[in-house]
Image: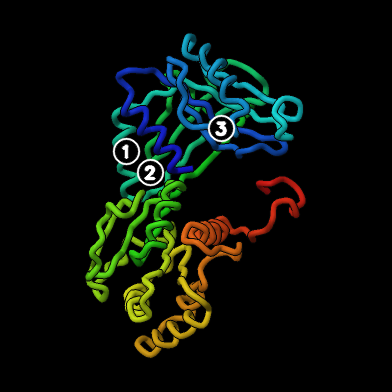
């Protein structure tokens, strides 16, 4: 969700001199839908949109409904019963509000993204279709609060409903290795909006141009690798295809505890790497060893680099979302439960 909000804000900054905007946010859901509450879609005064709140079922109607908000500058609630109109088996409630950004908000938001601080939002809404100046979204960054439209009232009211959301720092993926499968993993992960760093051995002759979607490409001396940028909103995958280099990187990473830590290769290779690692660092904590996952990925019968990248990313998502991967057709209840 964080990257989607950032993309919307970046889009407004780049186009603010040419357009006015309204923001559509799914704030409530009864039953099931393609996407959950918290998704957003931006519309400009030319009827163009950025982002989506469904699989394409309601976007055209949202654009049509947004025109009255441009004229009145009054937020509104619209509802869709997907059981009869969309085929999604749910009723979605959407807040449409004027959307403008102050220079102070932009500064605070960008600083928060860079420093990897969490951001919080609270959207006021009602369950009936209505126009009301007391509807809208407030963003909290540290101790500072910002509203997206100037007439929004933030006074507490028992009759108001609130959809609250937190935005964690943008997820990071650290790929240790620069072979063809690392290139493909980087490309696939970039579609998720993750911030990707390629950590290549010092003797690597590739550049960042080989890695579509990568933000950083570094070739540090392995023993002096600085792991301070790896936090709980990060994943590590060791895939150098070199037994010795994987051990060296593991030693350099011995104090890190990311959300996910994977090793490419069969389980026997993982055991040998850990055995050799313990020869160098016998005092290593059990917690560090327990987090090492190998072979990295889910068993989906992956063979090609493209398929292996999907397998690895699927496991990372299942770990960070705390889900046991299964076939959806065998799941009881709603898809997103």
Give the CA distance from mark 3 to mark 2: 27 Å
92 and 267: which is toward the camera: 267
Please give the label number shown on residue 53: 3
Give the CA distance from mark 2 to mark 1: 9 Å
Q: Quadrant of residue 321?
A: bottom right
Q: Which residue is mark 2?
A: 142
**Element assignment for label 1:** helix
Determine the residue positioned at 60% across, 38% down: 35
Indicate which label's residue lies in the foreground, 2 or 1.
1
User: Within 10 angstroms of label 3, few (less than 14), some, or many (20 or more) residues?
Assistant: many
Determine the residue positioned at 53% across, 22% down: 96
Percent across and percent down for residue 211 are 33, 54
Q: Which residue is mark 1?
A: 108
69 and 42: which is toward the camera: 42
Would residue 36 appear left or right of 178 to someone viewing this image? Answer: right
Indicate which label's residue lies in the foreground, 3 or 2.
3
**Element assignment for label 2:** loop
């Amino acid at each position: 969700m964080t990257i989607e909000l950032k993309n919307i804000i970046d889009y407004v900054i780049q186009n603010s001199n040419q357009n006015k905007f309204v923001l559509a946010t799914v704030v409530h859901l009864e039953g099931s839908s393609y996407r959950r509450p918290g998704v957003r879609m931006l519309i400009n005064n030319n009827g163009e949109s950025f982002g989506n709140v469904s699989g394409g079922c309601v976007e055209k109607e949202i654009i049509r409904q947004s025109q009255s908000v441009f004229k009145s500058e009054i937020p509104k609630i619209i509802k869709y019963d997907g059981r009869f109109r969309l085929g999604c088996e749910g009723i979605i409630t959407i807040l449409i509000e004027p959307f403008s950004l102050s220079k102070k908000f932009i500064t605070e938001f960008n600083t928060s993204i860079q420093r990897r601080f969490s951001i919080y939002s609270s959207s006021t809404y009602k369950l009936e279709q209505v126009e009301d100046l007391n509807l809208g979204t407030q963003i909290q960054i540290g101790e500072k609060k910002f509203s997206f439209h100037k007439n929004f009232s933030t006074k507490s009211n028992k009759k108001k409903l609130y959809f609250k959301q937190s935005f964690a720092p943008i997820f990071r993926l650290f790929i240790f290795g620069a072979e063809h499968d690392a290139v493909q993993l980087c490309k696939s992960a970039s579609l998720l909006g993750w911030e990707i760093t390629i950590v290549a051995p010092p003797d690597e002759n590739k550049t960042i141009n080989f890695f579509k979607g990568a933000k950083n490409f570094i070739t540090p001396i392995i023993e002096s690798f600085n792991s301070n940028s790896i936090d709980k909103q990060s994943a590590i995958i060791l895939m150098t295809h070199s037994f010795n280099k994987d051990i060296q990187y593991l030693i350099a990473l011995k104090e890190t505890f990311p959300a996910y830590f994977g090793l490419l290769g069969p389980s026997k290779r993982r055991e040998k790497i850990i055995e050799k690692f313990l020869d160098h660092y016998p005092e290593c904590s059990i917690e560090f060893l327990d987090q090492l996952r190998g072979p990295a990925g889910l068993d989906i019968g992956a063979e090609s680099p493209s398929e292996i990248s999907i397998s690895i990313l699927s496991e990372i998502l299942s770990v960070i979302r705390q889900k046991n991967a299964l076939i959806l057709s065998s799941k009881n209840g709603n898809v997103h439960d």
